Every structure is written in structure tokens, then in C-alpha cells.
Amino acid sequence: MIELGAGQGLLRPLVMVLTLLVISMVHPESFAGPAFAADAKFSAREAAAPVTSGLSQVSSLPARRGTGEGEDLLMSHEKRTRSFKYLSRWRNTVASMRADALAYRACLEISTNCINAELRSLRDLTRKIRGKDRRAKLLAVNKFFNKRPYKKDSGNFGHSDYWAAPSEFMRRSGDCEDYAIAKYFLLRELGFTENELRVVVVFDSIENIGHAVLAVYEGNDIVILDNRSNLIFSHRKYRHYRPRYSMSETTYWDHRPAQTAAKGS
């Protein structure tokens, strides 16, 4: 997963709130539109380096683009590819999500198929929110997974960078990308399409660490589901998050800062 420094305690939520408050004062345009009311590790090699519903079917719709002035997700410029050459872990994660989906659907169909407490809790949540609107689903899914304690990979899985399947995360918890992956999984099963969701690996320029979040394309905006907060805001608020790469089940995007990309074009 993405290498994180110390400071996972009470200071992080405070820093997050203060950061968003300052940004709202300096860049009020970042908060246009309604607001809805994580940590990942990336290596230098990776930084340079995807139905009607559910993970079993791949969306045929084109990849969604950002809504800024010629800019994309988190105010960057992005390049799309279908190559996962440098992200074999993500290919493995997608395969694990599809396997987890079979158990999840069996549990939804017949309660006796819910073979553990984790599946039962997912079933209970799904039954509560599946008839609600998209905003309510996003808020509920974000809050549901954010309740789980943050755990570093090294102590939790014995590896410095491990991407957990949703079922593993439900049993053992995890770090930032594991939250994002679990949210991706459940939202796909709740009817969100592949081209509406991306797991995004970013660099947090305030804390000087790698991080990961889930981006959701909502109408003319992109909102961010972050394990650091139960609130959901437009991606325009997160000016301190610099995306390195993002992915859906079938597509990978490389990101560059908008100014750098403009100079290079």
C-alpha cells in the first residue's frame, strides 16, 4: 500500500478540517455546487509508471473526464491507457473483488449464505440503502467503511505495501487504499458503473506522504470519498492532493499537474 508516516491519531482529522477551511477562504470557487453532508503508499516506479450492476460486467461507456477548465481529476491532466504493466497488484485486487462479489450476492439472495459477520453486516447495510438516492448511498458507504480502524500494512499483513481484497479489509481492516478499494467494490455492487468510479493514488503535499482515495463522478462534478473524513466534498477542495495515477477495473490513468502538462504540450 502507500507508505505513510506517523501521525495517525487525533491530529489528522483536525489538520484535514483546518486545511479545507483555509482552502475555502482562499479559493471559494472550489466549493461551487452542493457538498455531501485514507492513506496509500506509492513507489517511485509506480508514480512514473475497471453491467448493469456489479463487478461481473464491464461498462462500455467512455471514461469520464473532469469538469475544470480543460483539467481533469483533482485539477490535473491525465493520460488514459489500458495497460496495467506496473500495477499487477491492482489486477490481482480486481480478481479478488469479483470473487468477493459472488459471496456477497449469494448472501443477499439467501441469508443462510452469509457465512460470516462481515457478509451479514454488508447485507444489512445494502438492505437499508439500496432504495435510497445516490447521495445517500455515497454517504452511507463512506461512513460504514470509515468506522474500521486504520492499520498499517507492515503490522497487519506483514508487507510494506499490500492491497487487500474487500473481504480481507472487512476481517482485518487496513490502510488508505484498502478503504478506497472496499468502497469501490460496494458501490459497484450497488449500481454505480465502472466509468463513475476510480481508486486514486495521490501525494498529500501538506503531510508529505502518499495517500489513496475514491473518486466518484457525479453529474458535472467529481466527489472524493476519503477515509480521513465522513464528509464528501468536490475534488476541487483537495488542492493539496496531487494525483499520481488512478484506475478502474479496466483502465489506468497517469496524472500530471495541469501547469506542468500545459508547458509540455
Image (cartoon, grey):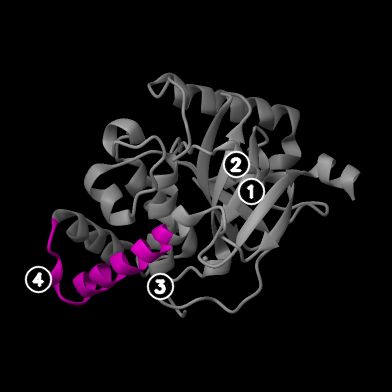
Q: Earlier in the sequence, mark 3 or mark 1?
A: 1
Mark 2 to mark 4 CA distance (whole Å) = 45 Å
Q: Position of residue 52 (x, y in %)?
A: 46, 80
Q: Between residues 107 and 131, which one lies in front from this camera angle?
A: 107
- Check contact, mark 2 vs mark 1: CB within 8 A: yes
Q: Earlier in the sequence, mark 4 or mark 3?
A: 3
Query: Which residue lies at the image location 60% right of the left edge and 41% below the top edge?
Result: 45
SS class, disc 2: helix
Report the side of 68 relative to 199 (left or right): right
Report the side of 126 relative to 112 (left or right): right
Eye-nearest disc, 2 or 4: 2
- 10 Å crowding of disc 4: few (<14), some (14-19), many (20+): few
Q: Which mark is residue 69?
A: none
What amino acid does circle 1 point to? Ala
Q: Is residue 97 visible?
A: yes
Q: Is residue 153 above or below residue 52?
A: above
SS class, disc 1: loop
The span shown in magenta is 92-116
Q: Is residue 66 visible?
A: no
Q: Earlier in the sequence, mark 1 or mark 4?
A: 1
Q: Which mark is residue 49?
A: 1
Q: Earlier in the sequence, mark 2 or mark 4?
A: 2
SS class, disc 4: helix
Eye-nearest disc, 1 or 4: 1
What amino acid does circle 4 point to? Thr
- Check contact, mark 1 vs mark 4: CB within 8 A: no
Quarter of the image with the N terminus in it: top left
Q: Which mark is residue 112?
A: 4
